[in-house]
Amino acid sequence: MALPEDRRKIAIRVSVLQFALTVLFAFLALAFWYLQVVQYARLFEFAENNHQRTLPLRAPRGVLFDRTHKVLVENRDSFNISIVREHSKNVAQTVRLLASATGVPEAQLLDTVRRYEREPKYRPIPVIEDASLAQVAAVAARRLDFPDLIFESVPTRQYPTDDLAAHLFGYVGEVSEEQLAGQNLRSGDIVGQSGIEKVYNTELMGQDGARKVIINSTGREIRRLDEIPPTEGRRLELTIDYDVQRATEEGFRLLGYNGAAVILDPRNGEVLSYVSIPAFDPNAFAARGPDFGATWASLNTDKLKPLQNRAIQGRYAPGSTFKMVVMTAALQEGIATPDFSVYCGGGATFYGRFFKCWKKEGHGSVAMLRGIEQSCDTYFYTLGNLVGVDRLHKWATLLGLGEKSGIDLPNEVQGIVPSTEWKRQTTGQKWYAGETISVSIGQGQVTVTPVSMAVYIATIANGGTRYVPHLVRAVDEGKGWKDVPAPAAKSQVPFKPATLETLHQGLWLVVNGAGTGGNARIPGRDVCGKTGTAQVISLEGAKALAGRTDLDLRDNGWFVFFAPRDNPEIAGVVFAEHSGHGTEAAKIARYAMETYFAKKEGKPLPPFPWPPPKPQNVIVAAATAGAPR
Amino acid sequence: MLERRLYFHIDWLMLGAILLLCGISVAMVYSTTFDPARNTASRLYITQAYAIAIGLGVLVACLGIDYRSLADSSHFFYILVIALLVYTLLFGSVVGGSRRWIPLRVFNLQASEFAKVALALVLAKFFDESRRGNPSINDLLIGLGMTMLPFALIYKEPDLGTAVTLLPIFLGIAYLAGLKMRLFGVVLLAAVLMAPVAWKFALKDYQRSRISTFVDPSQDPLGAGYQQIQARITVGSGGFWGKGFRKGTQAQLKYLPVAQNDFIFSALGEEQGLVGVLATLGLYLFVILRSLETARLARDRLGTYLVIGVLSSFTFQVIYNITMSAGLAPVKGLTLPLMSYGGSSMIATLAGFGLILNVRMRRFTN
């Protein structure tokens, strides 16, 4: 039995405890009030960010069709292996393991990680793009070692496998820092970097979607909250005809030439075929696999410059294809009539210097039609000398030479058609009349781009309307196809009917008479055309000789053409680098035209009509001097 | 056995509060172990319900025998517990680097939980038998020695958290036995002075890092500071009304690791909000104040000491765990009695309350 004073003492001490504990509990309640009421909004957001993730769903880019609605460029699903740093214990170690599991160099993986360093930690970094099945399997098998790796399925551009029209399509790549500025783009976006992909990027890009998911603390997706599906980019119907395109490229490959070709519908400027060879595989750009660095380096250092878009960026001497400019200027300016005759004895002397005709023994007395048919240099030296460089410049420019065509492709360059004014401005020197002689046969200072040659011949073909070559016919925003209006014609060349008549007759004779364009003759099609053979050595000078083989120094061959003679519906240019002579280019042109007509009339597509050249023949031909130009 | 007369003296209100807390425990264990990916709960809540049932059986058993008789054989319980602790150290199963459990066929026995009850009994008996009035220094040292023996064994497991809960038992009983407050002050001062020494020699690296990250959790947000930050987020995101039963994302998605254990109160705050927190805090406070009431009303000093001994470690654990649940104390492996998942703890705690109810029930008997 406790004593009363003991009891009192205990009671006091218990009361002290009761009081102290009540105060402590009150403090605890206050602490919870502070967290759950005062700090609620902030901490609630933290909790949401903990377990909710918004993952972007990349929109597929718009599909490209040809004019007959054949699919040219589409999308496929590829797998990216990505690191989510938020779930990494040690990023460096993950990278090391990943490198050994997949065979991708560690340095390259680290490089990618570094580029994304400033992105939020939950954002996946695609360290291996377009992973192979073996790589995916290797990582999936070691899932437990890689809690911080995820697979992402992304739509990836799929181009034709044989580099078809690579320069036309261009390629895509991650948006660069400069491109980010001022545009509605986010870092990591895939945008067009060249070709149609670049010019029509806004149309093709589409709208990325998003997926809201709940993930647990190890990053595993538990549930989907919400999904905004991506909107595919707009589909484009190109003016390109797949079969004509393929035939043109096949022509180059079968004959073994590099070069460029642009084939148009002369009635509106629609581009039927657009070639620049050698090309590259745009698929390598779309899914930049581990070897992309090496691919890129070799494309850049390749002497043949496969990344150069020759059709709009290459400038070459036009050779004899320039002779129609001389004719046009002479006839339009009233300097000569078709009867104007010149005696060719294998060349002539102008301003104290002898200029050779390609035919040593001479053409004898020639008038204008035979002059163009035979491509007699002496005739055009004489005529050009009468016209003068400034009038040549005037008419060449009117026909589109030395000008940008305005085609809807990026980075087109301008050719040069010299004039006295041009020379004074660029060199500060006066034009010597002797320089005009070379220009008259498309040598000397004059250089043109293949695309401007296409405009030139199409303008002659259609009677003087200078159309802007263009590549898109219709666009589908998801509500059906809508025609894209063709760009307005640049100008109308004021041809006299007689001038056109003479030009067309001359060009018809080149192909169908005793001229140099016989390779392009198609019975019943009334093909008109003109070959051109342009010296490379005179342009580039002796210093360029170093390190070049014979093949590099062989003349470039041109062929400009249209068909049929009346109401032409196809016109264009084939430029075959170092092919020795324009007659080779004419072979490619014929194959393209035959394909065009066969397809139009629903006939089976023709085979390539020429046997591939034997290599030794090519070298012999190169050594033969005095081939017709 | 229970006499009919005694039956009327059972503190039904307190028993009701305890049962309510047990009910909350089962619900929270169910909710925190629910797997949203598979849409099922683990079976842990059933295990917990079994433990409560067994615990209530032990509670009733503890009620049946007069606490004085129990105290008479307290040395036996004490020796048994010491033996079990030694056995644990030698043959216990190793989980996460420490030996804390004796594996039995059905469940793992955590002897350290029962050490609290046994220590409360033996210390109550010891101080009851010692001189009346203020306990002598001698008594205090012997009492401290009796405390330090199981303390050392549990500390050795290592389980510093549980070991520390033994100290309040000694302090609580000594306090009501009349420990001079001046002496109490001296002990406190000594403890403060010893702290830097303990920091340097007694604490292990992980313990030091836990304390230093408590001071500044952002120092190591993914390591030791992680749980503390996540605890605050868990509690705070519940807001006033809570996210609702089974809707706590933090606990279910395991941002707060093993929430059914040490952080069950954070999970409660997340799902039931401030409302649930205040209600539960109220229940705990009620149980504690009611028990203190019992200590005051006890028929004899033995009863008073027994109640305060059992209650001290319970109260210490409740306060520490809830403070930690709010991210306001360093993370320590201390469970919340009556709520955290764990059979041994639940049974030992209910046994302890059996003793408290026992004392209250027999306050009028001779």
Image (cartoon, coloured by chain):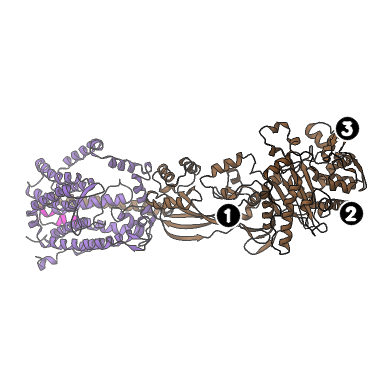
Q: Distance between the residues labelled 3 and 2?
A: 34 Å
Chain designation of label 2? A
Q: Are marks 3 and 2 in contact (CB under 8 Å)?
A: no
Q: Do the residues labelled 1 and 3 touch (CB within 8 Å)?
A: no
What secondary structure is found at the residue carrying circle 2? helix
The mark nearer the N terminus, 1 or 3, is 1
Residue placed at 9% from the left, 56% from the top? B70
What secondary structure is found at the residue carrying circle 1? strand
Magenta-colored stretch includes residue B292: yes
Q: Give the range drawn in magenta.
A: B291-304
Residue A280 visible in the snapshot:
yes
**Looking at the rendered structure, which numbered label has been put on residue A158?**
1
Q: Mark 2 points at which residue?
A: A497
Label 2 in the same subunit as label 1: yes
Which chain is the one coloured brown? A
Chain designation of label 1? A
* Residue B34 location (% of width, % of height): 34, 61
| In the foreground, A535 or B242 | A535
* Residue A94 location (% of width, % of height): 41, 45
B104 left or right of A224 in image: left
| In the foreground, A137 or B30 | A137
Q: How far apart are marks 1 and 3 (CA)?
A: 59 Å
What's the colour of chain B in the image?
Answer: purple
Amino acid bearing label 1: Gln
Foreground: disc 1 or disc 3: 3
Chain designation of label 3? A
Amino acid bearing label 2: Pro
Q: How far apart are marks 2 and 1 (CA)?
A: 49 Å
Q: Mark 3 points at which residue?
A: A351
Q: Are marks 2 and 1 in contact (CB under 8 Å)?
A: no
What secondary structure is found at the residue carrying circle 3? loop
* Residue A350 location (% of width, % of height): 88, 34
